[in-house]
Amino acid sequence: MAIPAVLVIVPLGLLFILSGLIVNVIQALVFVLVRPISKCLYRRINKVVAELLWLELIWLIDWWAGAKVELYTDQATFQLMGKEHALVLCNHRSDIDWLVGWVLAQRAGCLGSALAIMKKEAKFLPVIGWSMWFSDYIFLERSWAKDESTLESSFQSLMDFPMPFWLALFVEGTRFTQQKLLASQEYAASRGLPVPKNVLIPRTKVKVQVKRHEMQELPETADGISQWCKDLFVTKDTLLEKYITKDSFSDKQPIDTGRPKKSLLVVLCWSCILAYGIVRFFQWSALLSSWEGIAFSAALLILIILVMQLLVHSSESTRSTPINVSSQDSAKERLLQK
């Protein structure tokens, strides 16, 4: 790993992991002490606590990367975002589209109640996976014999969710991949930019098209919902083709979602609290006064780097599971019927 990358990863990793562990401990305490008494109250408290962690990732988009999310939808849909339960059917094109979804959820006021259906390995990820487990994310094993009952019980559990929530589902089952460096080189050449050899062209915008469907519009049969979902992705494909060729989803002007200061405030607060705590800890323990203490500190930093690398690699499209379609397993098409 290059030295400049280490200089970025270590402080950000230290901030995210330490604050995340604090959030995990609070979530665990609330889970043990509050949930047995009131699941409704537990979920309301957890929403606030989970956002203290998720907002750090929102900060990466808004204030560190300086990326701008452009939202294309009608005003009626925009006004309802975050005010009603929603099943969000997303196409999976990039490594960070899940994070873009969180940005939209934060703008809509339901970041802490934004859930997703994910593969079970994700819940074992340090900090972020543990927080998802406490937040009622649905984890599947990609075996319908086991996942059918998991989905049924999970959907039933969400029936009494005390606040509007989003449940994200990537029905494609995996992410879109391509030869990214080659594509970046072709883009640079077409725009008269320096052609990269070891990096990709950085992107400072993310454009999102949102269309709202009421549940009453959806078919009630398994075959009907299956065909509806397929038709939906035919429309998505046409829309993306239009965007690729004309650089626009539609004639609509994008809605300005702003760049709220809440994530910046949370990161600044975490930074001050943790910096003070670390300084006081070293003063109390005199950890850096011996070779053993220095070795322990160095090992801790290396561990943080490895954990951050694990979290980054876990979201890369090259590590996603290929689609395994079985035309004979028609029972899987009942997923959205429940």
Image: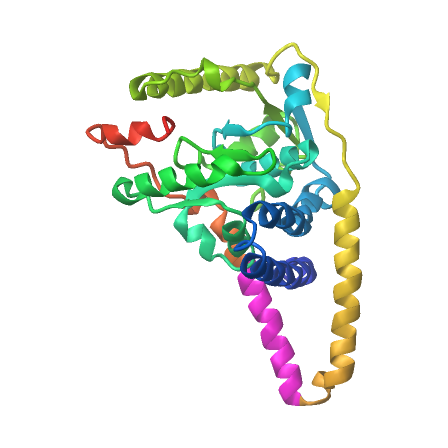
| Residue 160 vertical position relative to residue 119 in the rendered view, above or below | above
Q: Is residue 300 magenta?
A: yes
Looking at the image, the residue that sits furthest to the front is 37
- Left or right, residue 67 beside residue 127: right
The image quadrant of residue 151 is top left
Query: Percent from the top left, x then y, of residue 308?
Result: 57, 59
Query: Percent from the top left, x then y, of residue 312?
Result: 54, 52
Query: Percent from the top left, x then y, of residue 318?
Result: 43, 44
Q: Residue at x 61, y 38 (%)?
A: 102
Q: Residue at x 38, y 15 (%)?
A: 219
| Quarter in which the C terminus is drawn | top left
| Quarter in which the N terminus is drawn | bottom right
**Stretch in magenta:** 291-308
Q: Nearer the viewer, residue 10 or 202?
A: 10
Looking at the image, the residue that sits furthest to the bottom is 290
Q: Nearer the viewer, residue 237 or 142?
A: 142
Q: Residue at x 71, y 21 (%)?
A: 255
| Residue 21 vertical position relative to residue 54 in the rendered view, above or below | below
How did the renderer colour the structure? Answer: rainbow
Q: Is residue 165 magenta?
A: no
Q: Nearer the viewer, residue 320 or 328?
A: 328
Looking at the image, the residue that sits furthest to the left is 328
Q: Main secondary structure of the magenta part?
A: helix
Query: Percent from the top left, x then y, of residue 109?
Result: 68, 35
